[in-house]
């Protein structure tokens, strides 16, 4: 059996699209909301099963990865998040790069020699890697309008993955992936009559308009904290809005606080674009925190730890 495990955001989805366009095969899909990164817990294997893992931290999944390998499966692991010490095993192949300027889809693009590059560019835009996306797109000779379409699509696919539970999302990530896989080019998906594209765009436009009315709860020259209401739209838009704020004010770090389904807060952190580091270290101070140097988060922050988070946030980016 072949099993594909992937993050439910734009990067995870577009990485798998590239792989399966290149090598079509029927697989079991395991994914979830963007913040559901302990996905290997759901993987049950037998000897000679083949598992592909995309865009989830090896460090966060180390124990289950070791279990899967010990049970006789072969694993191809591609990621750009904090990995820690990479396991050494004859059945494990890794493609891991934690540079702040790459993402899983760009790593797959290199692996496939740019065969489906427009999907990789879409993902890079979704991860707010604007410079990397534009650089990668140069060989595609796109018009300004075409590049803008890929950027908008990347943002919308990423936006769809955000939320505390699947019920917050417009489309379950596995369903959206299966639809997108039917298009060799993202431009074909955008142009297709009756595709989910229009619904995704409409949802994003509506939610981003709502969040623009929220004012900072705490603000200094170097950081800003926004707390969103306990609404599904707020849980969907938090991560994408953090990216927008980072682009708008590149010298400031931002944190978006939203409510989760566990009776606490979910936090999205963006380091200043002029100094893309420290977000992973900050969030890792908290039990359910992790991510990348430039963009990280905390899945569950107890209500009584918010002030502690703000103190540590300000300390990190004073």
Image (tube, helix red, strand yellow):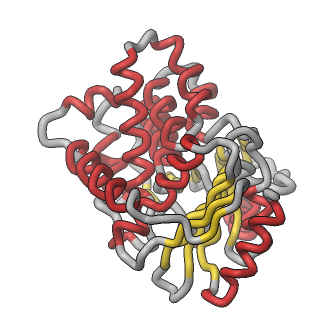
Q: Nearer the viewer, residue 94 or 194?
A: 194
Q: Is residue 38 above or below residue 6?
A: below
Q: Nearer the viewer, residue 246 or 137?
A: 246
Q: Residue 189 in the image: x percent, y percent?
A: 26, 34
Q: Residue 288 in the image: x percent, y percent?
A: 68, 74
Q: Residue at x 56, y 32 (%)?
A: 130
Q: Is residue 283 above or below residue 141?
A: below
Q: Residue at x 36, y 75 (%)?
A: 231
Q: Residue 64 in the image: x percent, y percent?
A: 69, 68
Q: Nearer the viewer, residue 195 or 50?
A: 195
Q: Residue at x 85, y 51 (%)?
A: 88
- The quadrant holding residue 132 is top right
For the C terminus, the quadrant is bottom right
**Left or right: residue 41 compared with residue 92:** left
Asked if residue 298 can be seen in this view, the reply is: yes
Q: Residue 82 in the image: x percent, y percent?
A: 76, 54
Q: Residue at x 38, y 62 (%)?
A: 213
Asked if residue 45 can be seen in this view, the reply is: no
**Left or right: residue 279 compared with residue 54:** right
């Amino acid at each position: 059996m072949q099993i594909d495990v992937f993050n439910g955001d734009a990067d995870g989805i577009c990485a798998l699209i590239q792989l399966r366009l290149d090598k079509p095969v029927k697989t079991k899909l395991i994914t979830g909301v963007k913040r559901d990164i302990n996905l290997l817990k759901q993987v049950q294997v037998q000897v000679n099963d083949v598992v592909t893992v995309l865009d989830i931290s090896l460090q966060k999944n180390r124990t289950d990865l070791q279990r899967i390998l010990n049970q006789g499966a072969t694993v191809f692991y591609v990621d750009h998040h904090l990995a820690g010490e990479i396991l050494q095993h004859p059945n494990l192949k890794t493609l891991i790069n934690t540079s702040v300027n790459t993402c899983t889809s760009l790593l797959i693009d290199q692996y496939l020699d740019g065969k489906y590059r427009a999907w990789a560019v879409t993902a890079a835009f979704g991860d707010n890697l604007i410079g990397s996306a534009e650089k990668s797109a140069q060989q595609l000779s796109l018009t300004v309008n075409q590049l803008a379409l890929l950027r908008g699509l990347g943002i919308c696919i990423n936006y769809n993955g955000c939320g505390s539970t699947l019920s917050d999302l417009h489309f379950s990530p596995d369903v959206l992936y299966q639809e997108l896989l039917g298009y060799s080019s993202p431009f074909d998906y955008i142009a297709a009559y009756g595709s989910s594209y229009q619904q995704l765009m409409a949802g994003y436009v509506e939610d981003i308009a709502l969040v623009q009315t929220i004012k900072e709860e705490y603000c200094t020259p170097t950081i800003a904290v926004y707390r969103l209401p306990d609404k599904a739209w707020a849980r969907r838009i938090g991560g994408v809005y953090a990216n927008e704020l980072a682009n708008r004010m590149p010298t400031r770090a931002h944190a978006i606080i939203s409510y989760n389904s566990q009776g606490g807060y979910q936090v999205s952190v963006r380091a200043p674009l002029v100094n893309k580091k420290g977000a992973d270290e900050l969030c890792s101070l908290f039990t359910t925190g992790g991510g990348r140097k430039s963009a990280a988060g905390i899945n569950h922050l107890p209500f009584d730890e918010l002030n502690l988070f703000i103190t540590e946030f300000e300390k990190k980016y004073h």
